[in-house]
Amino acid sequence: MTKKKKSFFQILFTSSFLSLVLLIILGVTLTFSFKTFRQEREVRGQILALENEIEKVEGEKSKLLETLEYLKSDFYKEKEAREKFGMQQPGEKVIVILPPIENQEKNMVKEEENLPIFKKWWYYLFKK
């Protein structure tokens, strides 16, 4: 019986060593692929969050620009001049309605308290 010598490649491909090496390489490759996939997913999430924030900031910007245009308008300036400074246009009259003064009300109540009882009844019955 003659034994044939196996070549290095035949030994390598038929041995369990090659299987072990291939499994290790496959495991390392899968680990790095999973890590890369996870990082990519995190980056996509961050991109979506930033895009949402951009939309929100652009909305706020547009509202602020509208407010700025309103504040620059002649209507707003005229309104503020009327309300804050009591200004008026030529030919207009300003009417100011003052709230009742508490002292006057208190004086009226005190005067009513000093009246005789028959006058109080008279006012109560006939002067509503």
Image: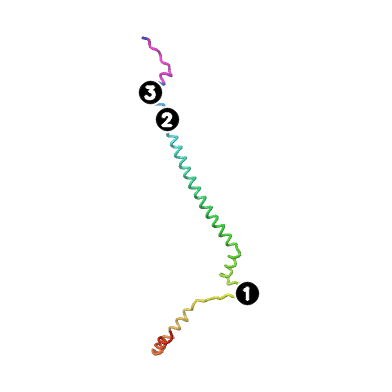
Q: Between residues 64 and 75, which one lies in front from this camera angle?
A: 75
User: Which amino acid does the dot numbered 1 rest on?
Assistant: Gly
Mark 1 in CB contact with mark 3 (< 8 angstroms):
no
Query: Which corner quadrant of the image does residue 82 belong to?
Result: bottom right
> Residue 34, position in %: x, y?
43, 36
Relative to 61, is 35 on the left or the right? left
Q: Which residues make up the magenta segment? A: 2-12
Relative to 72, is 22 on the left or the right? left
Picture layout, residue 57 above or below residue 28: below
Residue in the picture at 50% in, 76% down = 99
User: Which amino acid does the dot numbered 2 rest on?
Assistant: Leu
Q: CA distance from mark 1 to mark 3?
A: 107 Å
User: Which amino acid does the dot numbered 3 rest on?
Assistant: Ser
Residue ID for mark 1: 91
Residue ID for mark 3: 16
> Residue 63, position in %: x, y?
54, 57
Mark nearer the viewer, 1 or 3: 1
Q: Earlier in the sequence, mark 3 or mark 2?
A: 3
Q: Earlier in the sequence, mark 1 or mark 3?
A: 3
Q: Earlier in the sequence, mark 2 or mark 1?
A: 2
> Looking at the rendering, in which quadrant would you find the C terminus?
bottom left
Considering the numbered disc 1 on the image, is that residue within a helix, a strand or a loop?
loop
Considering the numbered disc 3 on the image, is that residue within a helix, a strand or a loop?
helix
Residue in the picture at 38% in, 23% down = 16
Q: Residues within 10 Å of mark 2 (few under 14, many from 20)?
A: few
Residue ID for mark 2: 26
Mark 2 in CB contact with mark 1 (< 8 angstroms):
no
Relative to 84, is 46 on the left or the right? left
> Residue 10, position in %: x, y?
42, 18
